[in-house]
Structure formats: C-alpha cells, structure tokens
Image (tube, rainbow, N blue to C red):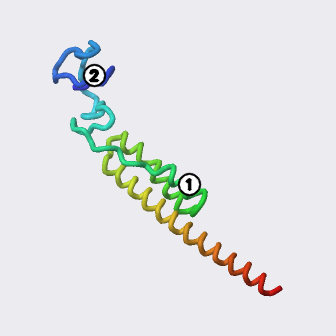
Amino acid sequence: MYCKKCGVQNADGAPTCTACGAPLTKNPYQPVGAQQPFGQVGGSMMGEKPKNYLVESILVTLCCCLPLGIAGIVFAAQVDSKWNAGDQHGAIASADNAKKFTLIGFGIGLVMNVVVFGIQILAAIGAASAQ
C-alpha cells in the first residue's frame, strides 16, 4: 500500500506510513490501482518514458513541412499524458508516430529545399547566359 501523502510503499494492512506517520486507509470506492505513483502499473515499474519529439516536430513544422509537422506535434503532445495515465503502450505508440511524422516531414522538406535550390541555380545560369 502506498502512502497518499509521501508516496512511500508500506506493508499491506499497515495502519500508518513508516516514513511520515500519515494514517493509511483503504477507500472501498477507489478503483484498484488508481493511487499508484507515476511510472507504476500493477505494482511493477514500467520501462523508461519514451522521448516525445515535441521540439523536433515544432522545428519541422516551422522549417520543412507544415502538415506532417502538425501531425508530429499532435502525437508528441500525447506521449506525456498517456505515460502519466499509465498507458505505457499508448505512449510508446504515440512516440513512434511522432518520430515517424517528424522524420518524414524533415525528409520531404530537405528534398524540396534541394529541388528549389537547384531550380534557382538553373534560373541564374539561364539568366546569365541570355545576356
């Protein structure tokens, strides 16, 4: 049983917390697992929180590819809330989607910038040879 005041794990059925002395009582109306500390599901520790790629998604939105960057931002924003709610698989899936959209948007933006730069070089060469 976890103390609601300090979060320390105590023996099941203990009347008070061993760390802070707060009374430990079970609420019969509280769903099982609702008061577990962040990062724990069913009493066992989850793995490391996945990277959310929010900064990268914002940069891709501003510099490279607006639609895919926005999709990356949406998925990146879901990672922390899903993780804190205990949805480990949902957080990992959102992080994977954010990474996917961010990388695809960066790739498309990079290719488009190279193409535009090439067209500008060709136009400058054409203008210089026409004179």
Q: Up-down: is 99 above or below 7?
A: below
Q: Which residue is situated farthest in the top direction here?
A: 21
Give the secondary structure at mark 1: helix
- Mark 2 vs mark 1: give the one in front: 1
**Dot label at residue 117:** none
Give the secondary structure at mark 2: loop
Q: Up-down: is 114 above or below 95?
A: below
Q: Up-down: is 79 above or below 42?
A: below
Depth check, front residue: 123 or 102: 123
Tell me how far mark 2 sits from mark 1, CA to CA: 42 Å
> Which badge, 2 or 1, comes first in the chain's sequence?
2
Residue 30: x, y in percent? 28, 30
Q: Which residue is situated farthest in the bottom direction here?
A: 130
In the image, what residue occupies the spot 24% across and 18% down?
Answer: 24
Mark 2 residue type:
Cys
In the image, what residue occupies the spot 26% across and 16% down?
Answer: 19
Residue 55: x, y in percent? 51, 49
Residue 128: x, y in percent? 78, 82
Q: Up-down: is 123 above or below 52?
A: below
**Which residue corresponds to mark 1?**
59
In which quadrant is the C terminus drawn? bottom right
Picture mark count: 2
Q: Callout 1: 10 Å neighbours few (<14), some, many (20+)?
A: some
Residue 101: x, y in percent? 46, 61
Mark 1 residue type:
Leu
The image quadrant of residue 44 is top left
> Is residue 130 found left or right of 8 in the rendered image?
right
In the image, what residue occupies the spot 37% across and 39% down?
Answer: 84
In which quadrant is the N terminus drawn? top left
In the image, what residue occupies the spot 66% across and 78% down?
Answer: 119
**Which residue corresponds to mark 2?**
3
